Image (cartoon, grey):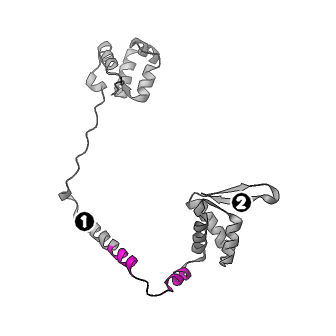
Amino acid sequence: MAIIKTPVNTDYLVEIWKETGLTKAAFSISLGRSSTYLNNTLTKKYMHPSVIDLVCRLYVADKEKLVKQPKQEKQIEPAETVKPDLEKRMEALEAMVKDIIEQIHKPDTSENLKNEAEIKLTYNEKALLLLKNMMFSGGCEIADFKSKAGTYKIPFENIEYAIKFAKDNYNWHIQTSGYGANKKTWLRK
């Protein structure tokens, strides 16, 4: 059997309680409940309907004020009332998506496109790209990353930038393992 819970206007309940001049525990006991009943009700913001009726009879309270009425849902505007500005934005967005799809499906005319794209990357971007590729499995040893970045002739300051950027923006963290000569530093997701 499910317990029936009715939402309560806790502000009005506090008013009723304060008018009685009783302590919270005494008020709760006067309702035939435990001494913590009023505290729990004020926290959970609901009561059993029979207790609501009892409060209204014992302390001459207004039941309509005590029972919290559910909020009415807002009416959604029909599709015909959509603002023209929004329609223009949607058309522009559709045109952009169409252009992007055309660019994707356009065949490569030159094999050098990939090389040209790599040349245009800055050292910071190259270091970040390498780090993301190495982090695919969930982590990489920083010494391995630095040595591999060195083979790609990425300067040391760009390597440090990539590690700091990953910590700050991707919420990756640095973790150490081992002791002494066996100590290793890892970058983890």
Left or right, residue 124 beside residue 58: right
Percent of width and height locating residue 19: 37, 18
For this orientation, the residue located farthest to the left is 80
Percent of width and height locating residue 6: 33, 27
Q: Nearer the viewer, mark 2 or mark 1?
A: 2
Split into 4 quadrants, where in the image is the C terminus?
Answer: bottom right
In this rendering, the answer to whether 13 lies above or below 176 is above
Q: Which mark is residue 185?
A: 2
Split into 4 quadrants, where in the image is the N terminus?
Answer: top left
SS at circle 2: strand
Q: Nearer the viewer, residue 14 or 162?
A: 162
Q: Residue at x 31, y 21 (%)?
A: 49
Q: Residue at x 45, y 16 (%)?
A: 34
Disc 2 crowd rating (10 Å Cα; few below 14, some 14-19, many 20+) is some
Q: Which mark is residue 145?
A: none
Q: Which mark is residue 87?
A: 1
In the picture, residue 84 is in which quadrant?
Answer: bottom left
Give the residues in magenta: 98-120
